[in-house]
């Protein structure tokens, strides 16, 4: 299913250079500094339930495509908020997936899935309606073997470090269990405070109250609220956290006075913020979090520009993160200015910005990252975590920001078996891009080998302090 020279340039000379570059990075350890795999997998180290629960039901990349063609989420086993009936027979779910596998032709999901099927599970026959039971039985049998337990796969995938993402309200019990087990796999957490910094997040006031209970701080006051964040960030650092992560609707930042921020916080707790005020509060909290990063060293990640849970009916029936987060246009030049005026010249601070608005790369983000010491560009993300998206990212950013104002690759996935596939795609695309620079006289071959290693491994390790 996998062509050896996939994703390399078509021109024979350039393809040859890409192939040579790739061979030097193909087996590099994986640094996965931001993602959404479940720490429970590594803590309990129990077999994955069945092929459907591994590949389909938890992966919004997969079930959103099927849903777009009329396949119900219930039939794919996606749980309902009200506990209503959904399919629980993994074989039936898999058959439905296999019957519709053609829908993924030409998509990055198809690349990732085929890579996992062939490279992880040793399959050589494509998934289809005709092979549904055969492929299900093969994967199911593999999942009963010790070498397919989560920790064994972690080691087989050559993962040097992986970060999960947790709310400040999480007790990090699974991470404690991992630490206490004595296993040497490096699984760290990341501080994702959306639930207690976004006035429009469901249950915001109650979440802030819980934050106060967990820290012993009076979170009805502005000072107590900020101190509670410091306490939780320090707790997360005990479990390896090197970053915070912020999934805001916009890239807006603010740098308010303490009195104005306190007044806005009071309105947020009362639930009386307008939409603009809620956005302003989120924006100010990015600046506060950057200041905290100067104190505690956490890398600040900003993931803006997604209209979360766009479908009201799906949100009501199935809850958050069910494939209906849609990219929006995002302004960075004006939106980031208050934050950058406050801390953008700090050499010891790392702010990593992602985007779902590709038009902003050449016009806004690359010029900003090419000037401000604190600012770095995150890799092509989410809808653009794809061969063409990665190629466009390099084309639109390199001439202005160079390679060293970017941070390598991160896979940002919930789908465990796609991790090596995603990193392989990124390494192949980057080697293809570098080969083109070499073939056209813009980069020496020696420099290309060094850059290939940096993009595949060193930059992510360095940027995320792993």
Image (cartoon, rainbow, N blue to C red):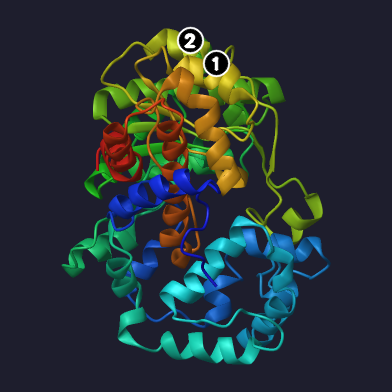
- Where residue 432 sits in the image (x, y, percent)? 46, 44
- Pointers 2 and 1 in contact (CB under 8 A)? yes
Which residue sits at x=67%, y=58%?
106
Crowding near the residue tagged with mark 2, few <14, some 14–19, many ≥20 C-alpha atoms within 10 Å: few
Which residue sits at x=54%, y=70%?
114
Q: Residue extending furthest front?
A: 13
Q: Secondary structure at mark 1?
A: helix
Q: Secondary structure at mark 2?
A: helix
Q: Is residue 8 visible?
A: yes
Q: Residue extending furthest right?
A: 70
Which residue sits at x=71%, y=60%?
64
The residue pinned by badge 1 equals: 263
Front in this rendered view, residue 452 or 174: 452
Quadrant showing the C terminus: top left
Front in this rendered view, residue 301 or 201: 301
> Looking at the rendered structure, which numbered label has been put on residue 124?
none
Q: Is residue 428 above or below residue 335?
A: below
Cα distance in 3D space between marks 2 and 1: 6 Å
- Where residue 219 sits in the image (x, y, percent)? 43, 32
- Where residue 266 sits in the image (x, y, percent)? 55, 23
The residue pinned by badge 2 equals: 259
Q: Is residue 85 above or below residue 398?
A: below
Front in this rendered view, residue 14 or 275: 14
Determine whether, in the image, residue 264 is placed left or right of residue 24: right
């Amino acid at each position: 299913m996998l062509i050896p020279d996939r994703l390399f340039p078509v021109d024979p000379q350039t393809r040859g250079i890409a192939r040579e570059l790739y061979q030097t990075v193909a087996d590099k350890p994986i640094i996965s500094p931001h993602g959404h795999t479940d720490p429970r997998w590594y803590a309990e180290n129990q077999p994955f339930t069945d092929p459907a629960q591994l590949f389909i039901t938890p992966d919004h990349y997969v079930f959103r495509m099927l849903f777009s063609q009329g396949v119900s989420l219930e039939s794919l086993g996606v749980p309902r908020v009200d506990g209503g009936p959904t399919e629980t027979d993994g074989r039936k779910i898999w058959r439905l997936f296999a019957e519709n596998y053609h829908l993924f032709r030409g998509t990055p999901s198809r690349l990732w899935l085929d890579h996992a099927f062939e490279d992880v599970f040793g399959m050589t026959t494509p998934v289809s309606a005709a092979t549904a039971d055969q492929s299900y039985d093969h994967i199911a049998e593999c999942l009963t073997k010790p070498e397919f337990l989560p920790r064994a796969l972690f080691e087989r995938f050559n993962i040097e470090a992986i970060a999960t993402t947790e709310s400040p309200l999480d007790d990090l019990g699974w991470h404690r269990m991992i630490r206490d087990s004595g296993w040497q796999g490096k699984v760290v957490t990341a501080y994702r405070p959306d639930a207690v910094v976004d006035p429009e997040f469901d249950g915001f006031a109650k979440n802030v109250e819980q934050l106060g209970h967990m820290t012993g701080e009076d979170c009805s006051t502005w000072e107590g609220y900020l101190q509670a964040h410091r306490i939780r960030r320090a707790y997360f650092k005990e479990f390896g956290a090197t970053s915070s992560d912020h999934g805001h609707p916009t890239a807006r930042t603010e740098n308010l006075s303490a009195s104005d921020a306190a007044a806005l916080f009071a309105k947020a707790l009362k639930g009386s913020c307008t939409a603009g005020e809620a956005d302003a509060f989120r924006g100010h909290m990015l600046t506060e979090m950057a200041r905290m990063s100067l104190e505690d060293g956490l890398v600040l990640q900003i993931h803006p520009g997604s209209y979360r849970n766009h479908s009201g009916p799906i949100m009501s029936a199935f809850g958050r993160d069910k494939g209906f987060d849609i990219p929006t246009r995002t302004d960075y030049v004006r939106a980031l200015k208050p934050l950058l005026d406050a801390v953008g010249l700090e050499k010891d601070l790392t702010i990593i910005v992602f985007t779902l608005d590709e038009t902003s790369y050449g016009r806004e983000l690359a010029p900003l990252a090419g000037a401000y010491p604190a600012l770095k560009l995150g890799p092509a993300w989410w809808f653009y975590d794809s061969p063409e998206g990665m190629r466009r990212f390099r084309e639109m950013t390199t001439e202005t920001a160079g390679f060293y104002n970017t941070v390598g690759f991160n896979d940002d996935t919930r789908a465990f078996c796609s991790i090596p596939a995603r990193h392989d795609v990124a390494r192949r695309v980057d080697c293809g891009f570098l080969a083109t620079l070499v073939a056209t006289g813009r980069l020496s071959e020696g420099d290309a080998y060094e850059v290939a290693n940096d993009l595949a491994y060193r930059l992510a390790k360095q940027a995320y302090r792993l």
